[in-house]
Amino acid sequence: MNDHIQELRKKTQRYFYDDGVVELGTGTVFALTGLVYLVVPLIPRHLGWVIGIGLPVLILLATFGTRRIISALKERVVYPRTGYIRYKVEPSRSRWLVIAGGLALAVLGFILPEEFAKVGLAISVLLALILVVMGARVSLNRLYVIAGIVLLAGLGITVAGVEEWRGAALVLIVAGLGLIASGINALVAYLRDNPIEKE
Amino acid sequence: MDEPIGVMLANVDKLIHEPARLAILAILYVTDGADFLYLGKHAGLTKGNLSSHLAKLEDANYIVIEKTFEGKIPRTLCRMTEAGRTAFDAYLSQMKGALNLLTA
């Protein structure tokens, strides 16, 4: 009986991702962040503070802005078609797993040979971990596929010897484009399968 | 002596045991509220059918139908009450016991 309730819980959580809007938004943030990272090596050294302050601010603004856009899209496109649910706020172990994964990578970056400390590979591993955890949490198999693509991109960039900032940028752009493509595919299928019912 | 399974099943909450209402309550059990459109689609009910079952659940104080605002957006949400949650937990426990007897 408890298994059935857990399955139902997963299904309601998956509903938030079914339409692809969240993937579209998240992918856009990743891709834009990657594009900004491409610009970083062009900034003169004496303006390094611009990166130190500007980059986190930019990422925060992009994330906040994307959340507003996701909410607005859900209101206009999703809720009139398949309805609205308010989710219970529950403590999540997966969040701690991702944080632990990030910390482990940071430690590895200090103690392992330089090959492992490549920023691009580290970011690809962390992103892949996040996608796998999310995919398992809501049983969304397409996230596993994107995780695989991101990991391959990280490995390819490391083998090709792409320098750190550019490597990180490429991984983020690949992850972003993967999520955007997956999101568009899901959204098209959702709109096709769920027309707005006429009164 | 253990309760016979027929007696166990006869004693389950009939209000919850009806398939449509069970589907509605199961959805509300794992969420903090859902609107009529979500409930209708995911419980597989027409508007009229849904309204009828929601009215019975509201009369029994198992659910409450609230008109709220989230920011500037008005919403009408169905939410399970504490009494509803307690009744649903009891129902799950009874059904689990009955199923365990059947499969023992």
Image (tube, rainbow, N blue to C red):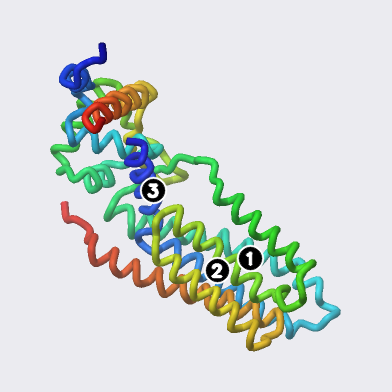
Residue B76 visible in the displayed image: no
- Percent position (x, y) of residue A106? 73, 63
Instruction: For the residues labelled 2 and 1, say whether their Cβ atoms are less than 8 Å apart.
Output: yes
Q: Which residue is mark 2?
A: A29
Residue A114 visible in the displayed image: yes
Query: Regarding mark 2 in the picture, which secondary structure is present there?
Result: helix
> Which chain hosts label 3?
A
Which numbered dot is residue A59?
1
> Which residue is located at x 19 percent, y 17 percent?
B4
Instruction: For the residues labelled 1 and 3, say whether their Cβ atoms are less than 8 Å apart.
Output: no
Left or right: where does residue A54 sit relative to residue A96?
A: right
- Percent position (x, y) of residue A48? 81, 75
Q: Calculate the distance from the C-alpha at mark 1 to the C-alpha at mark 3.
A: 30 Å
Q: Which residue is mark 3?
A: A10
User: What's the amino acid at mark 2?
Assistant: Val
Which one is closest to the eye, mark 2 or mark 3?
3
Residues marked 2 and 1, same chain? yes
Left or right: where does residue B45 sit relative to residue A46?
A: left
